Image: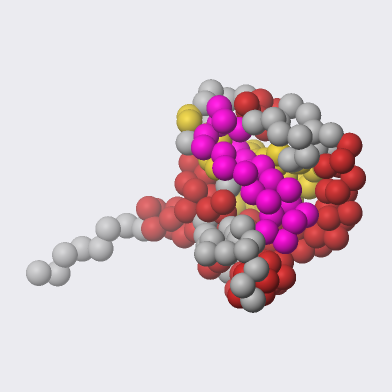
Amino acid sequence: MDIMPERDLMAVMLPRYQFAEHHEGRMAASPAAILDAIDRLDTHDDAVVRALLMLRELPARLAAAAGVNVPIKGRPRFGMANFTPLRRGPDQAVYGLAGRFWRPSFGLEPIADAEAFLAFQKRGVPKLIMGFRTIPDGAAIRLVTETRVFCPDRTSWLLFTPYWWIIRAASGLVRRRMLAAIKRMAEGEASRLAAPDQPCLL
């Protein structure tokens, strides 16, 4: 992931969008520790998130098991690994994705890096970014995450809109559990670093 000077990286990566979802949580850890925790996050470590993602993919997986040639066949389950790291600054990080998300297989398009994401323009294929920003909040840090989606044409907007409203509740739950997992990892690392060295008894 490229290291960028401090600015609004979400606006840089996706200046226009029609859909947005916002969540946040407070953490007793440094911005660097929080952003590092996001890089290490595996959504499949959470049983609830894993179950929701399995349910979302179930129709495509069943079709693949029945011998139907679908793009999801042989592909690992959807998760953070599908997102391309785009930009990172001292207080924020942005990840990107492109696809026809309403399809059973998500209709994902390959995105190599930030430059490829910025250049990507394909009729009928929305672009999505998931951004994280750390904000000082007293003795703690407030981590704000926002997901934004840009539909490049009316057809993709019409297809994506009902899908967005159908998945909103589950998507919000996933984001909240991601924040909780990031908090555990970042605060755990902060506690480990703050703990005094144990004396050698030998």
Most extreme residue toward the left is: 202
**Residue interval drawn in magenta:** 93-117
Number of marks in picture: 0
Residue 38 colored magenta? Answer: no
Please report the residue visible at 53 percent of the width from the left and 50 percent of the height from the top. Answer: 38
Residue 104 colored magenta? Answer: yes
Please report the residue visible at 56 percent of the width from the left and 51 percent of the height from the top. Answer: 82
Image quadrant where residue 148 sits: top right
Please report the residue visible at 83 percent of the width from the left and 53 percent of the height from the top. Answer: 164
Please report the residue visible at 48 percent of the width from the left and 29 percent of the height from the top. Answer: 3
x and y percentages locating residue 202 in the rendered image:
9, 69
177 sits left or right of 181 in the view: right
Question: Does residue 81 lie above or below 200 as drawn?
Answer: above
- How are the residues colored? secondary structure
x and y percentages locating residue 118 in the rendered image:
63, 28
Whether residue 187 is visible to the viewer of this picture, yes or no, is no
x and y percentages locating residue 89 in the rendered image:
53, 31
User: Foreground: 166 or 184?
Assistant: 166
Image quadrant where residue 174 sits: bottom right
User: Foreground: 67 or 160?
Assistant: 67
Question: Does residue 173 lie above or below 14 as drawn?
Answer: below
x and y percentages locating residue 43 in the rendered image:
57, 61
